[in-house]
Image (tube, rainbow, N blue to C red):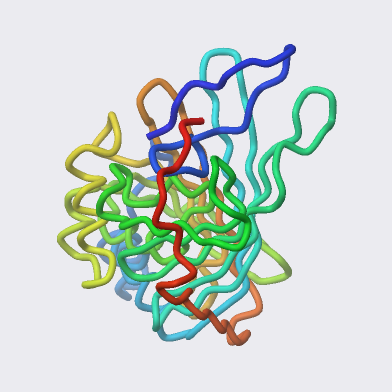
Amino acid sequence: MVQRHRRTGGSVAAVVVAAGLLAGTTGCSSTGAAADGSHVEDPADVVRRSADSLVGAGSSKVSTSMEMASGGTRVTIRGKGVYDFRRQAGRFDVMLPRDAAGVDGHRPITELMAAGALYMKNRGAGVPSDKWVRIETRSLSDGNLVTGGATDPLAAAELLRGARKVGFVGEERVGGAEVRHYRGVADLRAAARGASAGQRGALGVAAAKGFSRGAVPFDVYLDERGRVRKVRQQFSVADANVASTTLLYDFGTPAKVRLPAGKDIFAGKIAEP
């Protein structure tokens, strides 16, 4: 869960979460038949299949941005990495924001995402720099959609399996690719029911207790193969509003993710932020 920011000397301390790193639609659904009698596919169906299209693509590079607003405070956390959609595994470098004086708040945090688990290195709070922290994503109330500071890209796509009230906005370009822009809301419970085995547990927890709203507004941009090129989702968590933006590009890029051995995982107590 996202906690309120601590002010030190007028600056905003790094966002922290439970386990460590962070302490209306537009357009009408185009269902039915076109004027020439041809069938027009339901935009909601197109969006719901986007996670399958990513799995078919295999892997990609990923850029993430997470904007958090609470009270009069706003911070942005950015990340970059690679993700293997078939293995449901990724590696990211996550940069916490600078403080008001322009000083970096933390070294880049390395995150490994795997089905059911999140690993973090350089997270501070008394954890040795050569050790990893392992967190079960089902133990996170938001299913790691927000907690890690970099939304799991497959979880973001799986959330779209609960797409409702989807409208086609128009054709645009994202990262040099022609895309179709859709806008709607995702029902968390429906998404959890339709999710893959590796994501179902975490999304089920998020649906049950992660967010103050059961529906997540989204904008998604799909290429000609139905792959997500960009997705922006808005979450309400406790007293904060979070906007997560994920960009996917360079599909097919090798995404080698090696999970840490047991001896490299920190077993001590994590200091309170």
On screen, residue 225 above or below 16: below
Looking at this view, is 195 or 4 the one in front?
A: 4
Coordinates of residue 92 in the picture (x, y in percent)? 59, 64
State which quadrant residue 155 falls in. bottom left
On screen, residue 227 above or below 210: below
Looking at this view, is 33 or 106 the one in front?
A: 106
State which quadrant residue 42 falls in. bottom left
Looking at this view, is 106 or 124 the one in front?
A: 124
Coordinates of residue 127 in the picture (x, y in percent)? 54, 49
- Please identify the residue farthest to the right as the structure is shown: 102
Residue at image position (64%, 70%) is: 178
Residue at image position (48%, 85%) is: 58
Residue at image position (50%, 61%) is: 132
132 on left or right of 193: right
230 on left or right of 86: right
How many numbered marks, from 0 up? 0
Looking at this view, is 57 or 254 the one in front?
A: 254
Coordinates of residue 76 in the picture (x, y in percent)? 64, 37
Q: Which of the image's four quarters has the N terminus?
A: top left
State which quadrant residue 179 falls in. bottom right
Coordinates of residue 246 in the picture (x, y in percent)? 56, 56
